[in-house]
Image (cartoon, grey):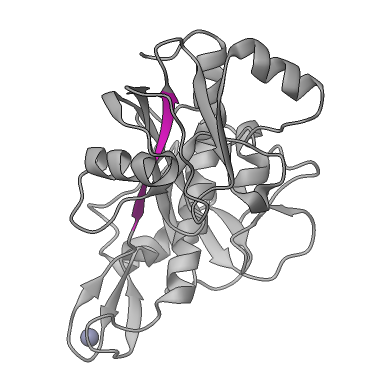
Amino acid sequence: MINWAMPSDLDRVDHHRASPEWVAGLWYAEDAKLLIVDAESRFSTNAGGSKLRMAKPSMEFDSQRHRLLGLLNGSPIFAVEERADGEMHDLREVGFQLTDSELDIAATAAALTHWHRLEPRCPRCGGDTIVINGGIARHCLACGLDHFPRTDPAVIVAVIDDQDRLLLGGKSAWGNRVSVLAGFVETGESLEQAIHREIGEEVDITLSELHYYGSQPWPFPRSLMLAFFARAIDTDINIDDDEIGYADWYTRDRLSARLEAGELTLPGRSSIASRMIQAWRDGEAPI
Ligand SMILES: [Zn+2]
């Protein structure tokens, strides 16, 4: 499973994509590939969803609909939003079984598609916009502003106490699924401030050390998950019912027993939450 820590193989060609002719030329290249994304940001895959299904573009290039994601090993990769036949999956379902470069392609395609659908007008003046730069930006015809997709940072925190127990909790709507806690960063906050606030709000726990663990694009619809491990100073949980429905401390044995008994489930394997919990279970948490 990718840890998103190495350079991407997807070359986003930022230095060239301002030229419409250059982008259009790539569309007609022999090795060009097109990924179809539907209105739910699901993408076209093979049976079982273990591989993206991409084909050589067969229609005329349309700069307003066809998004250049970049070059993969020199081959142009485009995405288009369309209704599609065949199996469609999103990253939550199949991310863990895609290759690193397929993950980059799928995450970028899903995020871009959502943004174009949601924000077709100028955020400053409400004017009409056109797609520029091969699909990664829009230009306002009324006021001239170029605008770009936004990303919402969210912190996700594995809290560990001084007995090496992990704090797991869940919303009531999750059924018996538990996870490490998470929340959005608010305007004007640092990541660390957001962590202290969120963990304080949700379970009333005070933290000491914070250790950055890694990040993961999470285009549902436009989040960036920023993962940390944290040490709890105190262990008395006081739940805010509005935020979560359940939280408790787990030893590795207790978690394994409850999983085996079918009393709990963990986050899907495509999520960074899954990777954080597994790191702790394997004794590889960074704190
Ligand atoms: Zn405008």
Magenta stretch: dominant SS? strand
Question: In the figure, 189 relative to 176: above or below?
Answer: below
Indicate left or right for 200 with 284 as reference: left
Q: Nearer the viewer, residue 26 or 147?
A: 147
Indicate left or right for 88 with 245 as reference: right
Q: Quadrant of ligand 1?
A: bottom left
Q: How many marks?
A: 0
Asked if residue 112 lies in the magenta stretch, the reply is no
Q: Please identify the quadrant where the N terminus is shown.
A: top right
Where does the image place residue 21, in percent across and percent down from the top left? 33, 67
Which residue is drawn at the image coordinates 42% and 52% (left, top)?
Answer: 223
Is there any visible trace of residue 157 in the rendered image? yes
Which residue is drawn at the image coordinates 28% and 56% (left, top)?
Answer: 186
- Read off the magenta span: 151-159
Question: In the figure, 24 relative to 184: above or below?
Answer: below
Q: Nearer the viewer, residue 236 or 46?
A: 236
Which residue is drawn at the image coordinates 52% and 52% (left, top)?
Answer: 241
